Amino acid sequence: MSVCKISGTTITCGTSTGTNFNNPIAITISSDGSTAYVVNLVGGVSGSGIAFTNEVGAVTGSVTVCSISDDSFNCSVPTGLGFSFPYGIALSSDDSKVFVTNAGGNSLSVCAPVAGSNLTCDDSVAVEYFNNPAGIVLSPDDTTFFVTNAGSDSVVVCTFINGTSNFTCGPPVNGSFGEPLGIAISPNGETIYVVNNRDDSVTICDVNGTTLSCGTQTGSGLTRPFGIALSPDGSVAYITNAGTNSTITECEISGKTLNCTEETGFEFESSTGIVIV
């Protein structure tokens, strides 16, 4: 894992830190910035895109929980049970629930952090409309979540039932997607940003309840883009490029258009997940 500092349009990264990872692919951080949750795919990722099998019921993968102190990470032994090629991860706003997509089982695992850098996870829930689910993001009010389907070039919109961890999902939303992976949401919850790994682009969609209105693909300087994170004010997108390993693309957001600049020189290896705190 690499820790980077952002100053204006300049990104400066230190050497990699942390242990107990196995093909780390996605990351989320608690609201107070003290804990990181890292998904270990155990199946690999290459510059040509994702590498997993849609093997329903195959149990593999884990989550590493790390405490954060300054720029260093103290990481536990990987934790979590019942994953099947876990791929994306999201955390509720109160830090009480961790949601993990399972690309191998077309399912979602709901977990709770417990003392000692551990997770307890319910049995994964198979979702009819998932097809190699990858990225996941929750709305700011925790009522809705969005999942990218890498296997069917679509996004699934799901809603939680009465404030519980139970949920219902609508049929996949098709748009100008090309192997969608990473996904981010604006601070006001009105826009999602979907990374298209195959098409080296981003699709921007307006959110109206459970309805999406998506524009055409946008962005430049992307090579097998993978993860995406937004600045706290939602004006800039930072995108990892798995194809070139050592770059981040920084994009100013203007409506449904991204104006991008590629930043280089980082010591990454198959850069995938990204988060901003």
Image (spheres, rainbow, N blue to C red):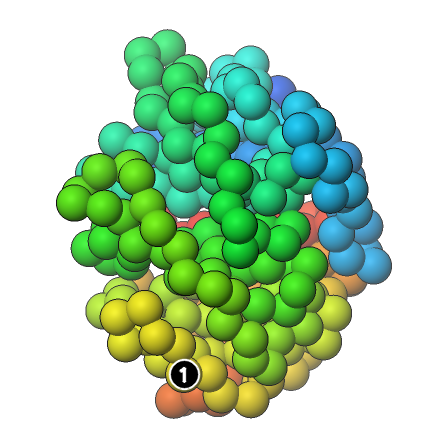
Apparent side of residue 46 relative to residue 128 in the rendered image (left or right): right
In percent of width and height, residue 70 lies at 38, 33
- In the picture of the structure, the residue carrying the numbered disc 1 is 213
- Of 99 and 171, nearer the camera is 171
Up/down of 232 relative to 38, above or below: below
* Camera-nearest residue between 250 and 229: 229
Q: Secondary structure at mark 1?
A: strand
Q: Position of residue 40 (x, y in %)?
A: 62, 32
In the rendered structure, the answer to whether residue 106 lies left or right of residue 173 reads right
Foreground of the two, 250 or 100: 100
Q: Residues within 10 Å of mark 1 (few under 14, many from 20)?
A: few
Between residue 262 and residue 82, name the one nearer to us. 82
Quadrant of the image occupied by residue 166:
top left
**As displayed, is residue 207 above or below residue 104?**
below
Q: Quadrant of residue 217?
A: bottom right
What residue is rendered at 68% in x and 78% in y?
A: 221
Is residue 237 positioned above or below 143 on the image? below
Q: Position of residue 126 (x, y in %)?
A: 52, 39
Q: Is residue 242 visible?
A: yes
Identify whether 235 is placed above or below 36.
below
212 relative to 33 in the view: left or right:
right
Q: Residue 268: x, y in percent? A: 69, 48
Which amino acid, by three-letter code, is at mark 1? Answer: Ser
